[in-house]
Image: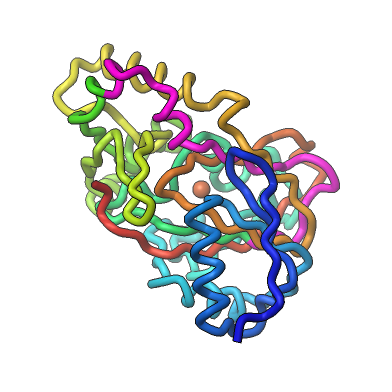
């Protein structure tokens, strides 16, 4: 039986609050379907005041599809666990640092687009967040696509972008990808304009994991990608989520870019979130 759930739209860009649910408990199929339907409509769902163990977050995540394993490795060489901790805490001192293990999440991206089968849904649960700042920004790439002119849409419709871990590391100024990482994560090609498998709406599919446009001269490709990103990531397309402890936020990687905002003092305030991911389908 459907529990007493309320969905409150937050804005016309992306985002709705889902009220009245305790996500530590299993959902009935009607509630799950209602969440999924809101997810496809609003792209970002916010569940406030949750208390979730890692196992409970895994249980909730699995109700929406196959859990995605992580290919990344922690500084000690071990694999990321299935519930990955997004943190600015130094692994040795346990104190906040301005130079965390990875800072790729501060650049616009769509999760795991360097995989042939990228992420569908990402779930972030706020364990410890700054009182103000450390927001996550979501850019609606369907609105970005819709704002293009017809000749632009015509130009982009047959283009493919090459996404890779190597390009991602380069684009974000991170330590270059190792030979092993390049072997594990070879470049993949995805359409620059992808169609949402449920809503059939088109969106631009790009971000920091993209190296270049297939078959296009390097400089021209670079200019086009930068131009599209600049035009897309404008205020009218962005929903800013201000975190509260206990928030669980889920979002649709098939039609959004996202990034964390450095609008807090990273050297003072902890920002710790638990992340799980649902595997998606091949973009078309
Ligand atoms: Fe991400």
- In the rendered structure, the answer to whether residue 140 lies left or right of residue 182 reads right
Residue at 26% from the left image edge and 13% from the top image edge: 220
**Residue 159 seen in the figure:** yes
> Where is residue 281, by image quadrant?
bottom left
Q: Tell which of 128 and 231 is nearer to you.
A: 231
Is 130 above or below relative to 171?
A: below
- In the rendered structure, the answer to whether residue 30 lies left or right of residue 209 reads right
Is 80 above or below relative to 182?
A: below
Residue at 65% from the left image edge and 84% from the top image edge: 25
Q: In x, y percent, where is residue 243?
A: 74, 50
**Residue 99 seen in the figure:** no
Does residue 270 belong to the magenta stretch? no
Q: In x, y percent, where is residue 209?
A: 37, 38
Does residue 143 belong to the magenta stretch? yes
Q: In x, y percent, where is residue 99?
A: 64, 39
Residue at 69% from the left image edge and 35% from the top image edge: 262
- In the rendered structure, the answer to whether residue 225 lies left or right of residue 218 reads right
Q: Which residues are magenta?
A: 125-153
Is 278 above or below relative to 40?
A: below
Q: Tell which of 90 and 264 is nearer to you.
A: 264
């Amino acid at each position: 039986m459907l529990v007493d759930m309320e969905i409150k739209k937050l804005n016309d860009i992306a985002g709705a609050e889902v009220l009245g649910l305790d996500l530590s408990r299993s959902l009935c199929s009607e509630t799950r379907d209602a969440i999924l339907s809101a997810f496809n409509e609003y792209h970002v769902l916010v569940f406030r005041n949750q208390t979730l163990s890692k196992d409970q977050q895994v249980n909730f995540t699995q109700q929406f599809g196959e859990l995605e394993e992580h290919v990344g490795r922690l500084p000690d060489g071990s694999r990321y666990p299935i519930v990955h901790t997004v943190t600015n805490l130094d692994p040795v001192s346990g104190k906040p640092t301005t130079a965390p293990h990875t800072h790729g999440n501060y650049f616009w991206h769509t999760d795991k687009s360097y995989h042939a089968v990228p992420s569908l849904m990402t779930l972030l649960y706020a364990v410890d967040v700054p009182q103000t700042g450390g927001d996550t920004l979501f850019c609606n790439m369907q609105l970005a696509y819709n704002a293009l002119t017809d000749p632009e849409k015509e130009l982009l419709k047959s283009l493919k972008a090459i996404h890779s871990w190597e390009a991602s590391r380069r684009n974000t100024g991170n330590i270059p990808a190792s030979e092993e990482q390049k072997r594990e994560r070879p470049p993949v090609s995805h359409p620059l304009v992808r169609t949402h498998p449920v809503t059939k709406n088109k969106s631009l599919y790009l971000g920091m994991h993209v190296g270049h446009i297939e078959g296009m001269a390097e400089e021209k490709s670079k200019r086009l990608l930068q131009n599209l990103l600049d035009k897309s990531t404008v205020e009218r397309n962005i929903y800013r989520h201000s975190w509260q402890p206990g928030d669980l936020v889920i979002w649709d990687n098939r039609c959004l870019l996202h990034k964390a905002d450095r609008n807090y003092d990273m050297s003072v305030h902890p920002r710790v979130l638990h992340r799980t991911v649902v595997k998606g389908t091949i973009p078309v």
